[in-house]
């Protein structure tokens, strides 16, 4: 599912006050990191990931793209050393976020 611009903006607004749930440490991209992101998305739908040791934009972008593919989610935005990811809950009963309709 491809998010539209107004949906991304809405999700960034929701994520503004959130604290990071997953932190990318020294080991960088590992299977454990992908599993943590996947589990967090199952619980929350919208999460922040903090890049602890990776300060270069190219590395953050590369890791974010790998997280998107591995966890089957979509990056909503990146602000500083934080990336915001979203994946809609498959079970309609458990969905916490309702995306706006234009």
Image (spheres, grey):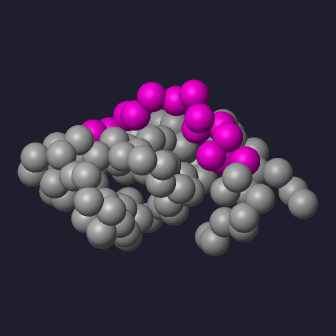
88 vs 42: above or below: below
Residue depicted at 66% across the width and 66% down the height? 3
Residue that extends furthest to the right in the rendered view of this protein = 102
Comparing 59 with 22, the one in front is 59
47 vs 58: above or below: above
User: Residue 56: within the magenta?
Assistant: no
Q: Position of residue 18 (x, y in %)?
A: 52, 30
Q: Is residue 28 left or right of residue 23?
A: left
99 vs 68: above or below: above
Tell me the quarter of the picture where residue 102 sits.
bottom right
Q: Which residues are magenta?
A: 10-23
Q: Position of residue 69 (x, y in %)?
A: 37, 70
Residue that extends furthest to the left in the rendered view of this protein = 27
Comparing 28 with 54, the one in front is 54
Residue depicted at 48% across the width and 49% down the height? 79
Comparing 65 with 51, the one in front is 51
Q: Is residue 98 left or right of residue 21?
A: right
Q: Is residue 75 left or right of residue 96?
A: left
Tell me the quarter of the picture where residue 101 sits.
bottom right
Total numbered circles: 0
Regarding residue 27, the answer to whether it shows in the image is yes
Q: Position of residue 76 (x, y in %)?
A: 56, 57
User: Residue 18: within the magenta?
Assistant: yes
Residue depicted at 73% across the width and 57% down the height? 7
61 vs 7: above or below: below
**Quadrant holding the N terminus:** bottom right
Regarding residue 36, the answer to whether it shows in the image is no
Residue depicted at 57% across the width and 28% down the height? 17
């Amino acid at each position: 599912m491809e998010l539209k611009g107004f949906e991304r903006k809405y999700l960034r607004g929701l994520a503004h006050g959130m604290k990071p749930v997953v932190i990318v440490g020294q080991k960088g991209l590992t299977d454990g990191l992908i599993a943590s992101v996947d589990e967090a998305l199952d619980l929350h739908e919208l999460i922040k990931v903090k890049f602890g040791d990776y300060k270069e934009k190219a590395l953050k972008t590369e890791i974010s793209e790998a997280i998107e593919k591995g966890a089957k989610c979509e990056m909503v935005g990146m602000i500083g050393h934080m990336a915001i990811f979203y994946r809609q809950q498959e079970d309609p009963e458990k969905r916490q976020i309702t995306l706006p309709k234009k």
